Image (cartoon, rainbow, N blue to C red):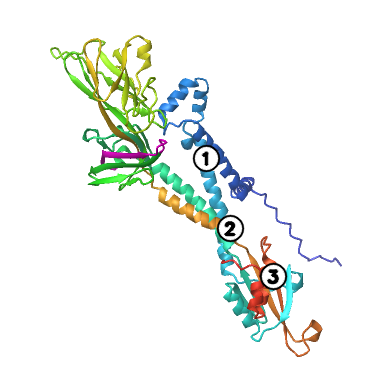
Amino acid sequence: MTVVDERPEAEAPAPRRRPNRLLALLRNSWRQLTSMRTALILLFLLAIAAIPGSVLPQRGISPEKVNQYFVDHPDWAPRLDRIGAFEVFGSVWFSAIYLLLFTSLIGCITPRLRDHFRALRSRPPVAPKRMERLPQHTVLPASAGGVDAVAAVLRKRRWRVEVRGDEVSAEKGYLKETGNLLFHTSLIAVLIGVALGSWYGWSGNRLLVAGADNAFCNTRQQYAEAKLGPRVDSNDLPRFCLRLDDFQARFLPSGQPEFFNARVTVDGPDEPTRSADFSVNAPLRLADASVYLLGHGYAPVIRYTDRYGNSQVSDEPFLTTGDMGLTSEGLAAFPDANVDPATGRRVPGEQVAFTGIYLPTAPQQAPFVRSEYPTERNPALNLVAYRGNLGMDAGIPGSVYQLDQRQVRAGKVKEIGSKLLRKGEKWTLDDGTTVEFLGTERYVTLSIRHDPGSTPLLVSCGVLLVGLMGSLFGRRRRVWFRLLPADPANGSPTDGSSLVEAGGLPRTDYPGFADEFAQLIAAVNGDERAAERAGVREGTE
């Protein structure tokens, strides 16, 4: 008889799936990117990457300094330009660090925020069985109210309390993690504020001379330096005009500034006509712009009369040299001088310019190169006259504050003399033409800017500081109380009263927890005076 084995055949094991290497690589890369260590490294790299933007001139702020850097460093400048060293904050590598930091912070905060909300909604954990193993442990007589009285004391001291039968669990100190999350969330908001200001903000600098003929209107062409964000067009600038009516300044006897105030008239389609005052620490707030007072100086008023009797007046600002006496240097050019009224043509090579040093308070004796005080106590203007082809008709951009020295070196412009003029004095040149020093006008240096990210940035920085304080001073800790039954074997009194076993655990490094625990035990015992003597006061969290 043949026996047939009817047992089912063993099933072959299912083939193991090979892990997707690409998916694993992406998952591990994301974990590394969103770790706190990576965020700190990126923050450090961002600070290092910003150093070239502070050391080297930037095209968006001072393009003329960038051009001068190319002249001074012909070998290094092209190499630095290729890596974006003159446009650091708009370069690819700086933007990459910025975006990686932004992504890392979001990826780091999101799971922590979810866990923190879950912890806030959860109940304090159950008391451990062996509370004597906790860092803080004691046994005390039970109060008349039992666990309810213990819970009432804890709630009065702002603990989160959970009563489970004969046990009381309490927890405190969520402010630490809340502050930590606030700090990092505010850091993201700071990055967003900086990005808003960079994309949608604009700024410009302008020297504004007093007088109705020197009004400034908010167009890009009228700025000495202008920087518009990538999302801003010239047509987006608010429409308003400024006219400097008066400028007042007071100085200490030592020459140090004490008080500045500029009075302007504001008008335009986007601003009602009004008079406004502002100073260094109190800018002028307009609807979509703020006007800041950066500096001030003098604009000598010079009248030149050519050989045909035609007079021209120059009131170009003279830039201060940086000394406390407001010594100023500048240029008064008259390219349209000596035009023959019969033919309407200018005599070739007869353009005139004067370089000068203005001294608000000139010394009594030579040399007349430095002012002794910033106010006009003894004003004097030291002029040097030049005649020739000033090079202003060539279409090459040049400075309005300095004479083109290339024309001087080429012999196209020649010096014809120098003279010190007091206010109201006249100087007759060798060809019979005259130059007269009429006086001065005040001018101010203005910075006009609009930054839509400034308010979010300010709020974010305030919240960041609040979160930082909570993160530094918050202390997470837990306490438990268990009502022990009346049993002489566990140390209960022979009169039948119960005991309460208490234990405490700090979740973070907290040197003062022992004092706080002793204070809490004294309060549960009903001895408020002992509670006050037990240690330092509890925090407000």
Identify the amino acid type marked 2.
Answer: Ser
- Decide if residue 260 is on the left or right side of residue 51: left
Q: CA distance from mark 1 to mark 3?
A: 47 Å
Q: Is residue 215 visible from the viewing direction of this image?
A: yes
Compared with 30, 57 (above or below) is above
Which span is picked out in magenta? 238-256
- Decide if residue 518 is on the left or right side of residue 380: right
Disc number for residue 451: none
- Decide if residue 8 is on the left or right side of residue 325: right
Q: Considering only order in the chain, which callout, 2 or 3, is on the residue closer to the N terminus?
A: 2
List x then y, in percent, for residue 359: 35, 26
- Decide if residue 471 is on the left or right side of residue 525: left
Mark 3, Cα crowd under 10 Å, few <14 / some 14-19 / many 20+, is many
Q: Which residue is mark 3?
A: 504
List x then y, in percent, for residue 326: 38, 31
Q: Considering only order in the chain, which callout, 3 or 1, is on the residue closer to the N terminus?
A: 1
